[in-house]
Image (cartoon, helix red, strand yellow):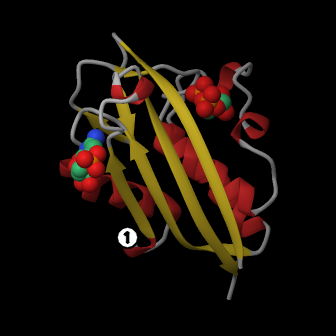
Amino acid sequence: MRIGFGYDVHRLGKNEDLILAGEKIDYPEGLIGHSDADVLVHALMDSILGALALGDIGKHFPDTDDRYKGISSMLLLKEVCNLIAKEGYELNNADVTLVMQAPKIAPYIDKMRENISFIMNTPVKNISIKATTEEKLGFSGRKEGIKAYSVCLLKEKE
Ligand SMILES: Nc1ccn([C@@H]2O[C@H](COP(=O)(O)O)[C@@H](O)[C@H]2O)c(=O)n1
Ligand SMILES: C[C@@]1(CO)OP(=O)(O)OP(=O)(O)OC[C@H]1O
């Protein structure tokens, strides 16, 4: 078994889509990044890369590389999944927490879990996604950005 932890932050801004776990969320602002800035998927990928001790997403998908400009982070997640298999592991489970004041994400959680489980080829029960506010404190509380934390456990392939 190998444990991994990931953390990411993206700034919110106008004229951007808000994409979380590959799902477009209805909100007047979106996250800014080189890719589609799917902060949830970025934290999840970093937790997986951490468990494999293979560095981080910036190392694998540099934000100086035009190939990743505007790319769906779900495609990057697929590549990270290939690394899990290549290293001889499979996902046991992952648990992701979004820290965002708005919008309420609860209505989207089931679809977001399905999206990740489809890309990772794992049962939905292996993917947990939760959300909390920071009670209007700090940059997330001021709706300036969104944070995501992820932990995952990988197990040796059977
Ligand atoms: N963006 C969010 C934040 C929270 N939720 C749900 O609301 C519950 C209460 O939030 P607190 O910050 O007061 O803990 C939380 O447990 C989530 O179920 C949400 O859906 N979207
Ligand atoms: C995902 C990548 C892809 O170029 O770009 P960003 O969307 O800027 O996201 P970040 O969390 O800064 O990680 C860096 C890159 O790996």
Q: Nearer the viewer, residue 85 or 143?
A: 143
Placement of 22 over or under 26, stated as above or below: below
Q: Nearer the viewer, residue 108 or 83?
A: 108
Find residue 94 and report its horizontal and vertical position in percent: 52, 65
Judging from the image, what secondary structure is the residue with disc 1 in? helix
Quadrant location of the C terminus in the rendered image: bottom right
Ligand 1 under 8 Å from disc 1 Cβ:
no
Residue, disc 1: 124
Task: Kindly give the residue lying farthest to the left in the view shown.
Answer: 107
Estimate how packed mark 1 is, as few (under 14), some (14 to 19) or many (20 or more) residues with alpha carbons within 10 Å.
some
What amino acid is labelled 1 in the image? Answer: Val
Q: Residue visible at 37% across and 70% down?
A: 124
Placement of 102 over or under 93, stated as above or below: above
Q: Residue visible at 37% across and 17% down?
A: 16
Q: In the visual, does 5 lie left or right of 33?
A: right
Q: Residue visible at 68% across and 68% down?
A: 3
